[in-house]
Amino acid sequence: MQKGSSGGTWTTRRLALACAAALVFLAAAATFAVRAELVVPYWVSWQTQSVAVDIDDDGTCETLETARRTCTLQHSDGSVLYESDPSWQVAQALVCDANSDGVNDLVMLIWRRGNYGTSRPFWDTAPDLRMTEHLYLMTLRKGKMMPLWMGHELGAPVERVEAGEPGVLLLTTTDGARTRWVWDDFGFTIEPA
């Protein structure tokens, strides 16, 4: 091998320069991906829980589990009642009466690609590859979990969703601001907390 004037090999120097260039490129690519909202932000905390809930109000508890960015509801016999869409990344889930109808609902704070999914309006023709945060509500109808409300991207980064009184959700953003989301039969009205 050819040696340089300082005793190190040219090959070692070239390798070090190539590694440094690769690290700079990877850092720039990661920064671009975060700014372009192509990846979930680093600050998102992913809930891991396994709690007993009674979503069908029959006196027998189901198990709500959030782990590895998914949400699952299981019957007491272990059979799966609901599993979140694999394209969603579930940050948090809880069971409460979110729409004030006296029936428990599944509330999920999720990250997913795009704002509309397969229900994109005709005027929005460009593909949306951004990872955006959404609030979804599912309800049990005839033994099956069905979508109740699947909102557009939240905009302000939400860190936590909690149950208030029936028909009210409390959302806390990453900067500590809290809002009350009050169900109004079509969706939510947002009020300061």
Image (spheres, rainbow, N blue to C red):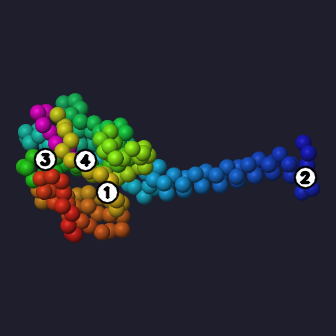
- Which quarter of the rendering shows the C terminus? bottom left
Residue drawn where x is 26% and y is 51% of the image: 151
- Res 4 label: 2
Query: Please, what is the dominant secondary structure of the magenta stretch?
Result: strand
Residue 82's disc number: none
Q: Quadrant of residue 72?
A: top left
Instruction: Give how far apart the Cα atoms at labels 4 and 1 are.
Output: 11 Å
Mark 1 residue crowding within 10 angstroms, few (<14) / some (14–19) / many (20+) = few
Q: For this view, does 131 lie left or right of residue 52?
A: right
Give, as a three-letter code, the residue at label 2.
Gly
Q: Are marks 3 and 2 in contact (CB under 8 Å)?
A: no
Magenta stretch, residue numbers: 137-143
Q: Are marks 1 and 3 in contact (CB under 8 Å)?
A: no
Residue 131 highlighted magenta (yes or no): no
Instruction: Mark 4: give few (<14), some (14-19) or many (20+) Cα within 10 Å.
Output: some
Between discs 2 and 1, the one toward the N terminus:
2
Q: What is the three-letter code of the residue carrying label 3?
A: Asn
**From the viewer's perspective, is 51 left or right of 16?**
left
Q: Specify few, some or many for label 2: CA neighbours under 10 Å numbering under 14, 14-19, or 20 or more.
A: few
The answer to whether mark 2 and mark 4 are in CB contact below 8 A is no
Which residue lies at the image location 92% right of the left edge and 56% below the top edge? 5
Amino acid on which disc 4 is placed? Met
Residue at numbered disc 3: 104
Q: Quadrant of residue 77?
A: top left
Observer-side mark, 4 or 3, equals: 4
Residue carrying label 1: 154
Residue bearing the label numbered 4:
150
Q: Residue furthest front?
A: 123
